[in-house]
Image (cartoon, rainbow, N blue to C red):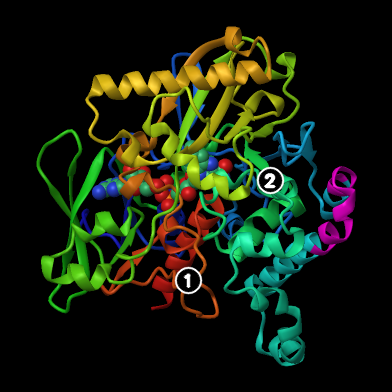
Amino acid sequence: MDNHYEAIVIGSGLGGLTAGALITDAGHRVLVLEQNDAFGGAATTYHRGAMTVEASLHETTDPRTTADPKGEIFEALDLYQDVEFVPVGDFYEVRCPLIGAPLSLPHGTEALGRCLTERFPHEADSIHRFLKKVAAIERALRIIMEKHDGMWWLAHGAELPLRLWSVLRDMRSSLSQVLERYFGDNEAIKFALAANLTYYSDDPDRMWWLMYAVAQGGFFHGGGNYLKGGSQVLSDRLVDRIRGGGGEALAGQTAVEILLGEQGAVSGVRYRPRAGGDSTVAHAPLVFANAAPHVIENMLPRVQRDQFMAPYRDKPLSITLFSITLGLSKRPAELGTRAYSTMIIPPWMERLTDFKRCAALLAGLPGGRFPALGIVDYSRIDSGLVDGALFPVSIVGLDRLENWEGLSDTQYNARKNAWLDAVIERLDKEWPGFADAVVQKDMATARTMHHYLNTPGGALYGFAPEVPDRLPFTGPPRTPRTSIRGLWLASAYAGAGGFSGAMGAGATAAKAALHE
Ligand SMILES: Cc1cc2nc3c(=O)[nH]c(=O)nc-3n(C[C@H](O)[C@H](O)[C@H](O)COP(=O)(O)OP(=O)(O)OC[C@H]3O[C@@H](n4cnc5c(N)ncnc54)[C@H](O)[C@@H]3O)c2cc1C
């Protein structure tokens, strides 16, 4: 009976681990299968020489300060005692020629309003109304997320349309449309408010305004946080919960086939060691797919594939990123950096919509335009990543899998190293002495993301957060339910991306499966 479980999770990203831990918490035995040697998917850390590399996390919200689906999960699994949120201070500093001197955005709606009004005094009224709107959306989200009994709905039902109006009014607006409504063609303030667009989308004309307002609003309101010790700490605690509840988590095991019973419902998963060897079958009536639907499709019997993929086939994928980690011999603060998180917008970007042009730049060698960069100095806070005298800095920018396709290994490495050196040179212009302080360097491209996470196009946030083309009340039809009985999506592909989105999707999948 050892190979019989109540649930099998394919992939150990945060969405899969959250579903697995909550199912374990409900008293069931779970098996997690992870193709890589480490658990966590993007939420992992690894070592390059003496340097600890954070594979993903720059900032996430603390659920105790803002509406966030992680809150319910942290409470249910008692994670606050093991996972420490470290506030990062100002949300980010933006360096953009259109704005003028570097501008640091504090968090807290009032402080943020004061800071922006000081820099853009002619926009004072619009800034006030814009931040009020973002805050109203966050409040509306809180109402939607809170658990209410029937009496509450009876008492508050009549006033709800008014309280939710901020959400309802802009159900089909893009980020560009709303920014335009408030700030016209003042591109400088748009860059100030969305300098970190790289982390969400490459196209403000198609990015869903509500998604921006909820994610960015959470940071505006409650500030950003890092997880002390790195994102691996969170992944490891979730694995501990699953193992502690009698389940198993196996690394280096690739799921290759989902087995269906006579009624077409899930009955198990076949998997084999990634390094090669015989396959094994594990049985369970529930399977949580943390791997992308495009990967799961090929594990299903051919006759089931079209129907399974129908909801996902035409959905555009989210952005992917390149990610550089540098180990410095000095604290970046000694070289003049002023914030945990800095956004550099290059001079050629004159409109927010120029973000659309960033990802394609890595298709050529550096020398021309530079993409927008997001930079994090982990030594500015008590991140737990500083090892001896090596100070880690992480840099991300938009990338595309197509940039790196069709290259030999030599060509690939030559272009990758050229960009790595060009980024260091760029940072040296911003902070003289930076290049000389670099003693360790590492770069992951869209190709690395694609291979390591087994995600189509290297997509890091599931599907793109685009304006919905239809109008269900909750926006794009993102649901963990699939056409196969017992098979649930538990990843960024079933909700929003990022740490909060992936964990929220895993929790929704677990709850739905338990109530089925
Ligand atoms: C450079 C970078 C910076 C980021 N910055 C932030 C940030 O600051 N804040 C934030 O909130 N988010 C950030 N993100 C995004 C965030 O990390 C992801 O959206 C989120 O972690 C995705 O989780 P997931 O559960 O959907 O899946 P993933 O983390 O993609 O995990 C999927 C897992 O499935 C496994 N798998 C695939 N196929 C199989 C198979 N056949 N068998 C077994 N296992 C399989 C993969 O190996 C992988 O472990 C960043 C990501 C990156 C890469």
Three-letter amino acid code of the residue under disc 1: Pro
Mark 2 residue CB less than 8 A from any atom of ligand 1: no
Assess disc 1: are there few (<14), some (14-19) or many (≥20) residues with their C-alpha within 10 Å of its C-alpha. some
Residue 63: mark: none
Q: Residue at x 22, y 53 (%)?
A: 2
Tell me how far mark 1 sits from mark 2, CA to CA.
26 Å
Start and end of the magenta stretch?
115-129
Furthest toward the left, the residue is: 278
* Quadrant assignment for the N terminus: bottom left
Q: Is residue 57 above or below residue 386?
A: below
As helix, strand or loop, the secondary structure at mark 1 comes to loop
Q: Is residue 242 visible?
A: no
Residue 172 drawn at (x, y percent)? 57, 73
Q: Amino acid at mark 2?
A: Phe
Residue 177 spot, x, y in % from top left: 63, 64
Query: Which residue is more in the foreground, 17 or 442?
Result: 442
- Which mark, by number, is residue 191? 2
Circle 1 residue = 476
Q: Is residue 445 above or below residue 10?
A: above
Residue 390 sits in quarter: top right
Q: Is residue 127 magenta?
A: yes
